[in-house]
Amino acid sequence: MAKKLANPISSLISLPFQNNTDLGIGNNNGSRNTLNIQPVVPITLTKDLNLIARLVLPVISQYNITSNGGNQMGLGDAVLSTFLSPSNSKGGITWGAGPAFLIPTGTDDFLGTKKWGIGPTAVALYQNKGYTIGALVNQVWSVAGDKNRGDLSTLFFQPFFNYNWKSGAGVGGNFEITQNWKGNSTNIWFNPTISAVTSLGSQKTQLAVGPRFNLASPEGAKSDIGFRAVVVFLFPK
């Protein structure tokens, strides 16, 4: 089970709730809490091919970010990624590719872009003897939306690594690198975690926690420290 969870495109229905709390942001010492709701649904197309749909919907609460004393709360923009992936990996290598869609679900001008976007996404990983190493990438361009908002061109790159014991416990981490080509800015987070697979009653669940380190960010937007907590509800076929 832990091995499947280390694979973002495994044939496992899951419902992750990933909560990120970031503190000491910018000149106003702001704070931001982002709860990412991230359902993953695999669909069997043929005996050799799967379609994996992965949605990320952020629920954001922030204070002292846009101005001293200013606060916003609501939804951010959602990203829907769809991967076509072979059903069986070869040599421990799994891969998938397809389109990614930016959906303007933001409920506040400061939390969303008011733009629709589309672009390619891909993931590849290698698993062997408890180890997982791989990367996920997408590039999204805006194609429609509010004409008063600037166009978007954003690259997201996420290398990840994990080691899982047979007990279901694990250690690992990832880098989350976002490049805003239009704004010529880069944001980099490093997220180490420890994790475990357990049962809450009859519900199989993974729990993970760890700090977050903001290695690079646009001027005036860097966080001093952050914390991540994840609960993943698992629904094996």
Image (cartoon, rainbow, N blue to C red):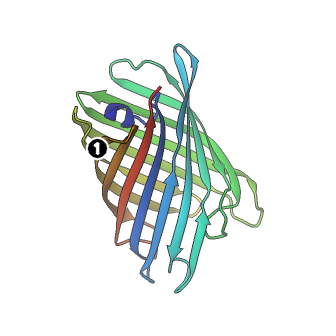
* Left or right, 166 with reference to 29: left
Q: Quadrant of residue 215?
A: bottom left
Query: Does residue 65 sit above or below 229 in this rendering?
Result: below
Q: Residue furthest bottom?
A: 68
Q: Position of residue 68 (x, y in %)?
A: 52, 86
Tell me the quarter of the image containing the N terminus.
top left
In the foreground, 163 or 13 = 13
Q: Residue furthest right?
A: 147
- Label 1 crowd (10 A; few <14 / some 14-19 / many >=20): some
Where residue 42 sits: x, y (%)? Answer: 53, 30
Identify the residue at image location x=58%, y=70%. Answer: 73
| Element type where label 1 sits in the image | strand
Three-letter amino acid code of the residue under disc 1? Ala
Q: Nearer the viewer, residue 199 or 10?
A: 199
In the picture provided, is 45 more to the left or to the right than 210? right
65 relative to 173 in the view: left or right: right
How many marks do you count on the picture?
Answer: 1
36, above or below 237, in the image: below
Q: Residue at x 68, y 56 (%)?
A: 104
Compared with 51, 184 (above or below) is below
Residue 204 percent location from the top left of the image? 38, 38
Tell me the residue at 39%/64% (across/down). 216
Asked which quadrant contains residue 94, the reply is top left
Instruction: Identify the image quadrant of residue 161.
Output: top left
What percent of the width, then of the height, locates residue 196?
28, 43
Q: Can I make out residue 219 in this image?
A: no
Residue at the disc numbered 1: 196
Query: Looking at the image, which residue is at 22% across and 35% down?
Result: 167
